[in-house]
Amino acid sequence: MNCRLLTLFIFLTVAQVAVAQKAVISGTVNDEKGGHPLEYASVALFRQGDSSLVTGALTNAQGGYVLEKLPPGNYYLRVLYMGYQTRYVGSISLAAGTKLQLGNMALRPGSAMLNAVNVTGTQAEVLNKIDRQSYRAGQFESARGGNAMDVLKNLPSVSMDGEGGISVRGSSGFLVMINGKPVITDARTVLSQLPANAIENIEMITAPSAKYDPDGKGGIINIITKKGAADGLTLSANLMAGLPSTGDHGNKEKPKRFGGDLTVNWKKNKWDVSIGGNYTRNDNAGYREGDVFTKNFSTKVQTFFPSHGERSFDKYNYASRASATFTADSSNVFSAGVFIGKRFQARTADILYENAAIDLTTGGQIRHTTYYNENLQTKQGNFYLGNLDYTHTFRNKSSLTASALWESARLYGNTRNRNLAWPNTAQVLQEVYNPYENPINGYRLRLDYAVPVGKGKLESGYQFRHDTQDGRFDYFVTPEASQADADRFRGAASARNQVHAVYSQYSGKYQKLEYVAGLRYENAARTVRLSYDPLPHKLNLSNLFPSANLLYGISQSWKAKAGYSKRIQRTNNYELNPIPEREHSETLEQGDPDLLPSFIDLAELGVVHTMKKGSVFATVYYQYIKNPIQRVNSVYADTILNRVFTNAEAASSMGLEAGASLEPTKWWSLYAGGNIYKYNIKGDLSILGEKTAVDNARWVYSINANTNFKLGANWSIQGNVSYLSARPTAQGEDSRFLVPNASLKKTFLDGRLSALLQWQNIDLGMRQAQRQRITTSGRDFFTTTNYIYETDVFLISLGYNLNRLTGKSKLPGSEFGDKEF
């Protein structure tokens, strides 16, 4: 027995020594310009003598890799990443038991990327990849102290109207992601809660692959937030304060503008922890001029009610957020995040109305009265989100990622309309009060698997998401209305959405051609239950979503790209809720529980040209939209319009997007982009059961330009302008919208401290900026409203950075609640 034990001990000792004699190579791979890690970079080890492949690995989320069990010998290493220049490490000599740490290897973006403009000298302003364009947020000084929307409106494919509505290539529907996590809620609410100072890059994915959710007819906007760049403590703090505009509309109160944000990151060994918080108070004073008439053909009466008065917003939001990543080893990475926030908005619309009626037959006046409508609408939301992610890398270099996201949101508010006599406003003619509560709960589960196959990568996965919303809406009117009328405006509406999805896609490279192709299948179920309807409104859909992207290197300076993606624009609960809300004296808001989602085919073809002092790109694109969702008007009563959601038959858009990033001299840089397209909407509209035909087409264009001048080592001045032309709608036209800005920046303490003076919405009394007129018409109505916003606003921002923040931190983004705000 003792002999056997001795033999076994000797065998195990020899085996252990033999294993210990195997060599190991480890290191990390990151982007040379931005410093962020490159996940799924291919690291391959070859024998020096015959160039035969020994082993390989794909980098993890932190850019790390480990090559194990290597016999002694002479080798060289090759690092590949799509869109970057290949890097080699030669003359690697390994002895038995060697543990070689190669440290960090920085890859330089290849000529396929649009990366020439370099204001700071260290970071690329624009990168162009196979399926997206990436823009550095810091180049837009006018956004400092603002939020993500202030950054977005500078991009060539993005335009913003006077109401804060965002469009990508003319499409208002798009999917927002924060650090790769999808957000299916309203973009404006999500982006307004994210400070611009916390954003590193914004990615525009215009033809997304099958891996991503197909939501959004305009594609995907992915927000990459900052995190620490090196071990130790990093900190970023910003303060903002502003004055009221130089123009005064005679509003009741002056707007308040102040805020700040703080981000702290601690990175040490296996831990990367980030915490942050922000508070922003950013009111917006304004004025409104309107003119409306309706025709009642049965009574032969035409009613006019022109109006004018204040339309202002008090707005604030605050939030705290935290994230942590734990890299247990080269094979296991855990990350978690939490977000807690509150948003408040109070809109004041105090309007003086002239109410007149004439006989359509004789033209004689029937009545003429004047009344004052005092309207206050408040919206509040408390948001609670959390996410948990885990990634495991197997020995065969494949990886499995599991993630979960949970959200709970309490949304509530009210609208109070008071019609007062004029000029004796102490006399109340009618008061309408609409309180509501709309809590939301939802979660998402996701499982993704990636494995090297041949010279490329095969990715497959399953996703499930579920959300419920239970809204209660009340109605009080003085003097009391009839019971039937009150019941029409009261009730409960609940909606449940479930989506099961599976996908698979393959990406690779063959000589000068890079490619990604995939297919996604989804089964979606929607149920809307109403308190006054015993039958639920159900919709079940099963659909395939194919996608493909190509990038071809014509030469060192020219690249061509092509893409196709099938998308869906899902309905939100606001659009589905049929219980009317008296938003204004003249308007009822109402949804449709049987509204259909829109289906979109996106196709694009473009070129990228890199020059010595800059680069340019141009992309031709086409969109075909089935069942486009429209908000349209109909007549509810002589002085009230019913604003409802419905589907049109079809719409299409064909256009050209182009941009240039130039640095003609060391002291001057220029970024400019534009988009021009022809939008056509046609077919039948169903408005509360009545059919009407629509056929409206027009050319639309937008321009975003940003230029920066260095006035010495520590001074710079920047100017930018955003212009959106007039554009057609289902029943009319929205006018053009112009926003110019300028800023002056001074840095101190080797750039760690900065002071910024911003001049926003420049107008100088010319009455051209920050104005938008919306016009609609039908057989029995006409309405036009001119919204006039603040101009010539001055802000001062102070920013301080201890060490450098860059890359992305895995903060959760809202999945469900924000879009109902």
Image: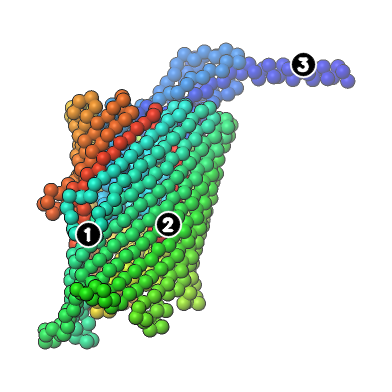
Mark 1 lies on residue: 251
Q: Earlier in the sequence, mark 1 or mark 2?
A: 1
Q: Secondary structure at mark 1?
A: loop
For marks 1 and 2, give the one nearer the viewer: 1
Mark 2 lies on residue: 381
For marks 3 and 1, give the one nearer the viewer: 1
Q: Dividing the image into 4 quarters, which one contains the C terminus?
A: bottom left
Q: Earlier in the sequence, mark 2 or mark 3?
A: 3
Give above or below for 718 relative to 739: above
Q: Which of 734/247 is in front?
A: 247
Q: Which mark is residue 10?
A: 3
Q: Position of residue 303 (x, y in %)?
A: 19, 79
* Residue in view at x 51 percent, y 46 percent: 387
Q: CA distance from mark 2 to mark 3?
A: 69 Å
Q: Secondary structure at mark 2?
A: strand
* Residue in view at x 33 percent, y 74 percent: 431
